[in-house]
Amino acid sequence: MHWHRPHLFIVFLVASVSSPILCPQTEPPIYKKRYVMGTVFEVVVYGLPTDRASAAIDKALDEAVRLDHVMSNYKDDSDLSRMNRTAHFQTAEIPPDLYRVIEESLPYSRLSNGRFDISVGPLVDLWKAAIRGGPMPTLQDEARARDCVGYRKIELIPPNRIEFHSNCMRLDLGSIGKGYAVDRMAEILRAQGVRSAYIDAGGSTMYGIGTPPEKKGWAVHLRDPSSSLNPEVMLMDNSVSTSEQTADSALGGESPGHIVLPTSGKPLKTKYAVNVVARLATESDALSTTLLLVGPENGAVMIKGRKDVAAMWISKDGDRTVADNGVQIFRENRAGVQTDGHSAGTKISGSPNQK
Amino acid sequence: MNRMKLRNFLRSLILGGLLAPQLASAAVFLRISGSELPAVHDMGVKNLVFVWPISDVSAVRKVQAQGYQVFFEASIGDLSAAAENAEKMNIAGIILAMENVDGPGDNESFRLVTAAHPRLSFLLLNPGGKEPQMRGRLVVERNGILQVSSPTSQPWVDTNLALVKLARAFRTDVIPLYSFHWNLSDALRNKLGPAAEDYCLAISEANAFHADVILDLHEKLQQGLVRKESSAWAVWNNVKRYIAFEQSESAASKLRPVANTAVVMDTVAPSYEGLNLMARHNIPFVVLRPGALQPKLLESFDTLVVFSALNSAAATVVGDFARHGGIVVLVNLHGEFPWHSLEPAHRDKQATVYNVGAGQVVELGEPVIDPEAFSRDLRRLMGSQRTTLGLWNSLTSVAIADRQDSNGETIVNLVNYAFEAEPVQVQIKGHFSSIRYESPDGGCCQYLTPAQRGPFTEFVIPALFIRAKVHLYNQ
């Protein structure tokens, strides 16, 4: 999967205490990275001897590589590619991970009335060529690609089969696959005895296991296209994901974005970046795209009733909308002064505890 | 490159234009600290670097006796002393670290020393080299704080390509030489030292870009090699394979870069990061000095990125270039230009676009603030038809192409910074019927199947791990 969310500016601050007296940290943090799913996966582990931490990270990264071979739409021999070639009007057997991630994606499609849709691949490919400097798609091209799209044409047959009710459907798990991989990596790290770790999947999805030494959580600075709010979140056994449309061209040319709205067949036009916190990375990953596609007004309604989920939309001009379920998850810091999260031009939604 | 290093690099380029270096041979140098090394033949590298002043002269004598060729690396202040001792000790040459070279006084010092020691070779070490790597976003600092390292989710590749291209543009007669120190701030890496892949990548990168490189031989590895530890030799035998592969590299002087983009600059400061990101985005470019803005020379390009001021004659050349179908991007250049008589096709707070004849002029009103976006947008503006070389499905690889006029061969050198073997699809302008591919891991040679798509030839490298070289012919 090489279809990224660009420009995610997430600053990760693990403020470990510098004084050895205050922080009796016996083991240094162990850090490793690997190129997986078209981006860099990074893992930091605290609190284990070097060899054990290193081995645990290797196992977690190996899992991400394994899942890339399952979910990649760039690898011809991946399970996803094979399924995309063979499941048209006939059932195809697929491995458990692929079945599960597809199954987990469908509720977001229903929730968003098809705006989030893992079958958007043909439309994405159409616009991808334009992003790379190719010609803009014609209306006919769009219509042809739109015929191939529609989550309702995906039929999952338990326990391990799938059928596309379309002759040109092609699934793309770019909006959920990294989150799914991060969750599996976290499971593996925990199984290896890791109690303090941080996983970063290319900056767009992060997960914190436990807390860093002497800290209450993993402080993550979030993408803010206005550069005025400096928002951050403290992760502790939960995840944050960020989604944003490709920025306009600085050279004056037309630049379609990489996130395509399946219902219109065209790249999404939005001024927002969205940050989503959820218990699991699969959820934060899928929801961040979903909430970007539906916008803050509809998105805030979606968030209501979802446990342990919060979202923040920030526009280029500094407007922001926060939606959560009573727990103030996001913090803002303007010019070094911690604020309570309120500002002029700010809409607060879905939170009875906030004004 | 941080601000200080960048300034030093720029100074060195300007000063370097006045110097007359004596020797340049595409090579790998090892900077060592200990006194013992295995035999030259076993190491596969002949050139050693000792940093002046030398703390243990006997160590130098010892490796010389083994047949190693020794160079002293000296600052401009130590140059004279280093050269005098080098001559006495039968040292092969001096490597001048250009880090703090500044002004005509230093240039005169250099001239006097080189004149006084005609038998010594003098090499110029460009400052600003960085460890080649696919960088992550998180950095473990000394006090344990982890911070962001990249504002983007795309893999960030630290490459020395821009440094090499600039060095070559400003000192055309010298093969660029650079160096870096391994980043050992990470606990695990500090314990184990750089991996074999790290050495292999650094060697591959330098040679793919036709440059020389000095590598620190990690003390732990050096000791392990001397003690004949199997783990150390497992590392070094891998490295040797890459060194041997690069020894077949053609001399850069016989090659002509395949590039459709010319970057015009007389000072480097405001544009270095832009160039860096252009290199990383595989936009094939060469650097031209403003005096080279001649219509004949520009015929081989279709995109022009201009960072230096244009006088009226140069503006006319640029306008004509656009009129004949070229794309011109002027970065933060303000003034009256011939195309201003036309109505802009587009204007926003960042850019004004003029359609000039069959081409286009884009005037950016400010310096390149986001080099990543600049490079991405430039690539988009050029469009797929203008790109002379493109990679697909390899965000961590850098490729450069050169043409050898003597036999019509085109060579594509590829480097993958991710240490993950991936199939890489390459698209190159031109028709090629024969494509031969070699790599340190796969050896020589495998023939790849070309596919013609319009004006392009496409082929797929089955598994690019770190390094590949592709030879293309039209028979």
Image: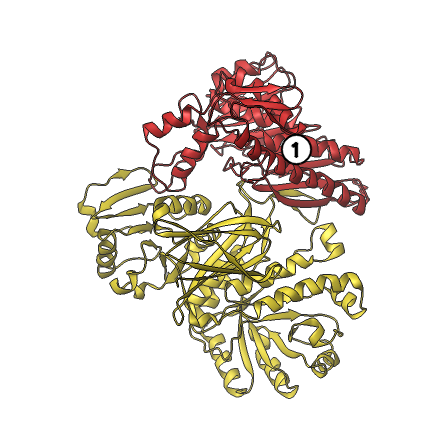
Chain colours: A red, B yellow
- Between A107 and B8, which is closer to the camera in this rendering? A107
A271 sits left or right of A138 in the view: right
Q: Where is residue A336 in the image (x, y as percent from the top left)?
A: 57, 34
Q: Position of residue A27 (x, y in %)?
A: 80, 44
Q: Where is residue A277 in the image (x, y as percent from the top left)?
A: 61, 25
* Disc 1 element: helix
Q: Residue at x 61, y 29 (%)?
A: A240
Total marks placed:
1
Kind of residue sitting beneath label 1? Val
Residue B232 shows in the view: yes
- Which residue is the site of mark 1? A182
Q: Where is residue B140 in the image (x, y as percent from the top left)?
A: 67, 46
Location of the N terminus of chain A (image quadrant) = top right
- Between A252 and B103, which is closer to the camera in this rendering? A252
Q: Residue at x 22, y 48 (%)?
A: B358
Q: In which quarter of the image is residue B227?
A: bottom right
